[in-house]
Image: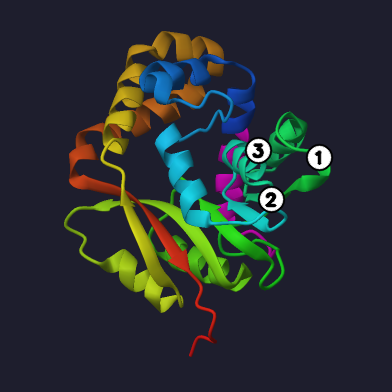
């Protein structure tokens, strides 16, 4: 992994504080469970809009065989990748910017798979620290980032994927943005194999944001003012914009032939 930029160092510090606060209380998970109801995979304990439908899509689109290698990029505390590693009988490598998230993910391994089948390391979307062509599949779920981050991430995912390997990514783009994301994927050397719509995702976030706002007192007591202020800022900023966004899952495949 290359040295972190000043911006990445700032993000790392913020994410470390976020994951440390979340690990100190089960309130965030209880709010997620309340918002999603029986669509919430409690064991995964994801910090994004992960439901059973998304997990099913990831399984069906990756098409991995037992013993192959899955990379969970932006893995957080590892729930999605570990669940997939168990379901698909594959080896897992998780990469996240937050060293705190990586430590928490390492501690969770044995709940899902034998510890030797999963490892986690600090890395960025532009520089994972992994060797070329080491992954048979990649998942990239609910990881924030602007256009430059996505371009860098797609280049890095293409580099670490074996020819014929697939990357399954969640995306949320403005409805008026046109085919920008398609051009980004194709410019990185990918074939776009599938696009699965996620029409329920805006409602998931709407429910979560409303609960964050309604449970402000509880959040401040359990997580502290800094983390609560961050959550409320996100809720107040994004909630009015949800209808303007289109959510989907893109399956990208690295062609077996050499890219030009």
How would you rate the neighbour count of disc 1 (Cα within 10 Å): few for under 14, some for 14-19, many for 20 or more? few
Q: Is residue 6 magenta?
A: yes
Q: Is residue 84 magenta?
A: no
Q: Identify the residue under disc 2.
A: 90
Horizontal and vertical percent for residue 65? 64, 56
Image quadrant in which you'd find residue 127: bottom right
Q: Identify the residue under disc 1.
A: 115
In this rendering, the answer to whether 143 lies above or below 227 is: below
Kindly report the distance in space between the C-alpha atoms of the residues bearing marks 3 and 1.
17 Å
Image quadrant in which you'd find residue 76: top right
Horizontal and vertical percent for residue 134? 69, 67
Q: Secondary structure at mark 3?
A: helix
Q: Say whether residue 46 is left or right of residue 23.
A: left
Span of residues in magenta: 1-17
Horizontal and vertical percent for residue 35? 37, 20
Q: Say whether residue 160 is left or right of residue 250.
A: right
**Can residue 143 be seen in the rendering of this structure?**
no
Q: Say whether residue 156 is left or right of residue 251.
A: right
Which label sits in the foreground, 2 or 3? 2
The disc placed on residue 247 is none
Q: Exactly how many numbered labels are in the figure?
A: 3
Q: Residue furthest front?
A: 65
How would you rate the neighbour count of disc 3 (Cα within 10 Å): few for under 14, some for 14-19, many for 20 or more? many
Q: Nearer the viewer, residue 181 or 237?
A: 181
Majority secondary structure of magenta residues: helix
Q: Secondary structure at mark 2?
A: loop
Q: Residue furthest right?
A: 116
At x 51%, y 60%, the residue is 167
In this rendering, the answer to whether 209 lies above or below 76 is: above
At x 42%, y 9%, the residue is 217
Q: Identify the residue under disc 3.
A: 101
Q: Nearer the viewer, residue 86 or 156?
A: 86
């Amino acid at each position: 992994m290359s040295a972190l930029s000043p911006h990445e160092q700032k993000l790392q510090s913020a994410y470390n504080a976020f994951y440390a606060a979340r690990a100190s209380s089960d309130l965030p998970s209880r709010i997620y469970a309340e918002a999603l109801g029986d669509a919430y995979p409690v064991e995964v304990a994801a910090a994004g809009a992960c439901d059973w439908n998304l997990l099913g899509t990831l399984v069906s689109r990756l098409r991995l065989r037992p013993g192959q290698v899955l990379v969970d990029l932006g893995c957080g505390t590892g729930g999605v990748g570990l669940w997939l590693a168990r379901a698909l009988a594959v080896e897992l490598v998780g990469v996240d910017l937050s060293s705190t998230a990586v430590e928490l993910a390492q501690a969770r391994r044995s709940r899902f798979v034998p510890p030797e089948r999963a490892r986690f390391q600090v890395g960025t979307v532009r520089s994972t620290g992994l060797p070329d062509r080491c992954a048979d599949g990649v998942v990239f779920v609910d990881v924030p980032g602007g256009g430059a981050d996505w371009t860098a991430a797609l280049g890095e995912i293409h580099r670490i994927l074996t020819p014929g390997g697939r990357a399954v990514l969640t995306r949320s783009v403005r409805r008026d943005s046109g085919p920008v994301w398609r051009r980004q994927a194709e410019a990185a050397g990918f074939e776009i194999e599938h696009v699965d719509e996620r029409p329920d995702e805006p409602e998931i976030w709407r429910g979560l944001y409303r609960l964050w706002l309604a449970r402000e007192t509880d959040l401040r007591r359990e997580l502290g003012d800094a983390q609560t202020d961050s959550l409320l800022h996100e809720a107040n900023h994004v909630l009015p914009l949800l209808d303007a966004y289109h959510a989907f899952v893109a399956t990208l495949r690295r062609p077996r032939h050499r890219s030009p």
